[in-house]
Image (spheres, grey):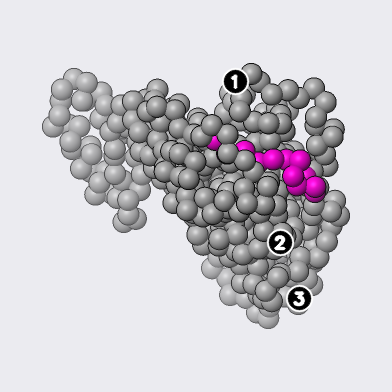
Amino acid sequence: MRLFNTLTGAVEPLRPRDEGRLGIYVCGPTVQGPPHFGHARTYTTVDVLRRFLEWTGLDVYVVRNVTDIEDNIIAKADAEGCTAASLAEHYTRVWEQEIGRLGIRPPDVTPRATGHVPEIHELIVRLIERGAAYPAGGDVYFSVRAFEEYGKLSGRRPDDLRAGARVAPDERKRDPLDFVLWKGAKPGEPSWNSPWGPGRPGWHIECSAMATKYLGADFDLHVGGSDLRFPHHENEIAQWEAATGTPFARMWMHTGMLTLDNAKMSKSVGNIIALTEATDRYGPATLRMFYLRAHYRKPVDFSEARLEEAAAAYERLAGFVRATAALDSDTPLDSTAREEFATAMSDDLSTARALAGLFDLVATGNQELEAGRTGRAAAHRDAVVELAGVLGFDFAETGAADQRLIDGLVAELVTLRDEARSQRDFATSDRIRERLRKLGVELADSRDGTRWHVARRV
Ligand code: AMP
Ligand code: ZN
């Protein structure tokens, strides 16, 4: 397997530190709100990388953190009149559910920032001891000038960054480039005790502490969106390497941004499409196909037309699998298709090329079917199911069109029930709820209306 390593700017062989076992750390969500369509691109990329490497026989261990304490979480909790912890807990569950719906396998470990305050303290203490950090009025800052290699990931060197930078009058840092490791708490803010007074961890330090806790120093692969390359990832490296003198991550993989009208999809820009809406509307397989048709490093702009193309592409695979479902295969295909698939995937995860190979298999398989050579057609189907499975497609899943019909029917019933309730006809509304429950569909009423999910299949 070869991957583009942002640290060196070259496509390089992936060589695990421990033979046969690959450790991946991916920056997880700041749980201040639900995931959007862009977030899932980065996590789908990790999912497909992991599935492929496991298929080649490697043991893969994935760590994805949860940033569960942060300024935006505190501000939003204040606005909603709840605690930061309960807001973070709520959105952690929402994330797990939404990402899970896409068939993205859960990480092996999901460490939370608030569960790793001792590890974060230890790292900060080491940085202070080595002269790479300093306490200032309840905060602690990292001293960027103290780490000579600062800028090696992003190419942004302190001398270039310095121009124009100034310390704001209310800031305690000595140098405008310095960044916060520990943030002293203002009255009323959630806080943890520390040698520097009550406060909370800065965002960057949690990833340095948690990645190395679960994967050790010099771990194999660090993944994140390209938006995090600077300053977040640059700072992750600086914190660990300045504290310990040992290397942090061997390889850095950065996923391209999902954009809307060519601007990064992000909460702060306000141009987001909620993941739950996209999944409801298009179905998980279409979203996965949408992401995988592009190379993971390239930015991709959201468009209806592209999603329709993705739906059609998935249907080409699924339609062939359906048409051959009842057929028994004769001898399996020779290894050519699998080898071509592996070659494409090993070449910096070229999923679009891997998919092109699958469409070729479908085309030949359809010809076999038309020619009445059903055993051959079924052999092609077996190869399609296996290789598409490595990309995370599961043909047992309901098709997007079927899903839209089901969603529409349930929504109609929920509307009827809401109408009955608003007329205080509770006998009817309860009957609808009960009948749906018998079909395995559970309704949950909340302030924002009624949501439903399939609790069990009948
Ligand atoms: P956040 O919670 O915004 O820090 O993002 C969580 C993860 O999703 C990070 O790895 C980000 O780099 C990634 N991410 C955020 N926005 C996008 C986007 N528009 N496209 C692709 N990845 C994104
Ligand atoms: Zn991170």
Q: Please identify the residue farthest to the bottom as the structure is shown.
A: 331
Q: Mark 2 points at which residue?
A: 246
278, above or below 150, in the image: above
Percent x, y of residue 396: 50, 59
- Whether residue 175 appears in magenta in the rendering, the answer is no
Quarter of the image for the N terminus: give it: bottom right
The part of the image, by quadrant, that contains residue 154 is top right
Between tags 2 and 3, which lies in front? 2
Q: How far apart are marks 2 and 3 (CA)?
A: 43 Å
Measured as percent of width and height from the top left, residue 292 is found at 69, 49
Residue 429 can be seen in this image: yes
Question: The magenta stretch spans which residues?
Answer: 139-150
Residue type at numbered disc 3: Ser
Q: Relative to 87, is 351 above or below?
A: below
- Residue marked by disc 3: 335
Q: Which of marks 2 and 1 is nearer the N terminus?
A: 1
2 vs 1, front mark: 1
- Alpha-carbon distance for marks 3 and 1? 66 Å
